[in-house]
Image (cartoon, helix red, strand yellow):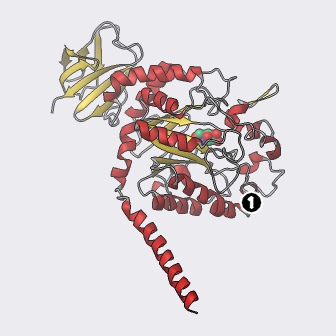
């Protein structure tokens, strides 16, 4: 009896120890208020999206067949059965992957955070998951924890580490419609094809995987959910998942695709208070006007999120820089995508655009980072951003007349070209307009910025 009693006491003490240390763990992290929690993200303005997985080996091609749309949808678009598709994770061995080099390219481009697809719709996990063996350690010859290497490289270089997690999972039997395994993935949108086992997937697979990612890889800046559209996933799950994440890492930011409030590709929530999520997620589009809630536009450089060599429709560097300015002038963040190939390399076209954006943000970042939306309607020649009593005029179309017309309510104290603080520009004001005398040649080949210190 004595032995049993002793082991009971020891067991009880162990339980108390674990609970208290867990409770103690939670109390260590100072819970910020929402504005404090969002501050780094709001100031960052510019992040890198990375779509990388077994689909990066396929490149959207199967023989002569080319997948329409994003190449990360290869499993669906190229009609692979689950069994056929599994050979790609079994081939995944991107020996040229260099997390430090990836983070350096993001940092040099002026990006302040990185969101990587830890698990996309294909279901293949880029970390050492204990919940599943369909991951980069157990299934792939690569046997390196990509999330570990990238999160450590981000920490080392002062870039916020964030991850994308797909609610949709084309590999997990409980996450498919009830026709599994002869499930036609496009039936995901069909509300009549639901899987009664989906709640089991949510509880026993999705949540434990999200917990692994939030527990084993240090601070996570943002959890970026996707796949919110499937009818199996409910708003009750969304609200539960949001608070689950905040319990594990109280200051992590979560996008609005954690719940069911998104109204479509415009990415914004109808009835914002009714749904969980900290920011809206316009996709491949920029709102026409400013939005006074938090939002981030995500966009590809060509037309595909995943690596797709056949897609040569690349946006120009000038277009990407103007998109960054347009987004910031409307109060948003820009999440710009890279689709590395199956060897772990960024496409050369992407690298050239990152370098061009880095040159521009290096010179003009003062007018971007921490700036707020324009208080004026967008002018024909470009955009305005504002910060600490200074207005920045981002000129896309440099005037040939040597004069730049400003909004009539702008009161100029001092105006200079941002990259030439010594040359003060003359300003002329009438009751109807304010005009600046500007050099005949545009100071920058893409977007020239004029710094306007405002009179009170
Ligand atoms: O289906 C995904 C797609 O593959 C990609 O991940 C984008 C990026 O936000 N989200 C979904 C399409 O809306």
Q: Residue at x 53, y 61 (%)?
A: 239
Where residue 143 sits, quadrant-wise, is top right
Where residue 430 sits, quadrant-wise, is top left
Identify the residue under disc 1: 195
Task: Say how many tags the image has.
Answer: 1
Outermost residue on the right side: it is 182
Task: Give residue 187's position: percent from left, percent from top.
Answer: 76, 49
> Is residue 453 visible in this depiction of the protein?
yes
Residue nearest the viewer, comparing 133 with 187: 133
Outermost residue on the front side: it is 3
Residue nearest the viewer, comparing 447 with 419: 419
Task: Give residue 232's position: percent from left, percent from top.
Answer: 68, 58
Task: Give residue 42's position: percent from left, percent from top.
Answer: 38, 42
Q: Residue at x 68, y 64 (%)?
A: 200
Q: Is residue 311 above or below residue 425?
A: below
Question: Which image quarter has ligand 1?
Answer: top right
The local secondary structure at tag 1 comes to: loop
Quadrant for the C terminus in the image: top left
Bin the neighbour count of mark 1 within 10 Å (Cα to Cα): few under 14, some 14-19, many 20 and up. many
Task: Give residue 156's position: percent from left, percent from top.
Answer: 43, 38
Q: Is residue 37 above or below residue 444?
A: below
> Is residue 260 visible in this depiction of the protein?
no
Q: Residue at x 19, y 20 (%)?
A: 429
Quadrant for the N terminus in the image: bottom right
């Amino acid at each position: 009896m004595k032995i049993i009693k002793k082991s009971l006491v020891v067991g009880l003490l162990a339980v108390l120890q674990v609970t208290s240390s867990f409770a103690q763990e939670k109390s260590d992290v100072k819970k910020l208020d929402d504005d404090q929690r969002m501050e780094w993200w709001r100031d960052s303005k510019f992040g890198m999206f990375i779509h990388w997985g077994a689909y990066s080996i396929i490149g959207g091609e199967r023989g002569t067949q080319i997948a329409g749309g994003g190449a990360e949808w290869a499993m669906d678009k190229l009609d692979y059965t689950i069994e056929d598709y599994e050979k790609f994770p079994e081939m995944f061995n991107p020996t040229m992957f260099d997390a430090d080099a990836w983070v350096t390219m993001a940092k040099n481009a002026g990006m302040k955070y990185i969101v990587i697809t830890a698990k996309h719709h294909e279901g293949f996990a880029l970390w050492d998951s204990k919940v599943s063996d369909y991951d980069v350690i157990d299934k792939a010859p690569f046997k390196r924890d990509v999330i570990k290497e990238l999160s450590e490289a981000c920490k080392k270089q002062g870039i916020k580490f964030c991850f994308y997690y797909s609610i949709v999972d084309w590999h997990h039997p409980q996450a498919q419609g009830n026709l599994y395994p002869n499930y036609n993935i496009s039936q995901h949108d069909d509300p009549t094809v639901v899987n009664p086992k989906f709640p089991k997937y949510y509880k026993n697979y999705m949540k434990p995987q999200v917990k692994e990612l939030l527990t084993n890889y240090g601070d996570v800046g943002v959890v970026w959910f996707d796949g919110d559209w499937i009818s199996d996933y409910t708003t009750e799950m969304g609200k539960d998942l949001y608070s689950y994440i905040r319990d594990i890492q109280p200051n992590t930011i979560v996008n609005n695709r954690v719940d069911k409030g998104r109204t479509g590709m415009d990415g914004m929530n109808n009835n914002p208070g009714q749904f969980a999520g900290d920011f809206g997620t316009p996709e491949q589009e920029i709102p026409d006007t400013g939005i006074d809630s938090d939002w981030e536009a995500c966009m590809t450089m060509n037309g595909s999120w995943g690596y797709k060599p056949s897609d040569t429709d690349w946006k120009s560097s000038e277009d990407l820089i103007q998109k960054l300015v347009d987004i910031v002038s409307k109060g948003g963040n820009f999440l710009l995508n890279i689709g590395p190939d199956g060897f772990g390399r960024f496409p050369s076209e992407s690298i050239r655009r990152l370098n061009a954006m880095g040159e521009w943000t290096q010179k003009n970042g003062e007018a971007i980072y921490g700036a707020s939306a324009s208080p004026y309607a967008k002018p024909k020649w470009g955009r305005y951003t504002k910060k600490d009593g200074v207005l920045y005029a981002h000129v896309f179309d440099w005037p040939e007349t040597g004069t730049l017309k400003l909004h009539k309510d702008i009161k100029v104290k001092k105006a200079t070209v941002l990259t030439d603080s010594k040359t003060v520009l003359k300003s002329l004001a009438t009751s109807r307009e304010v005009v600046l005398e500007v050099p005949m040649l545009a100071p920058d080949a893409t977007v020239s910025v004029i710094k306007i210190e405002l009179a009170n």
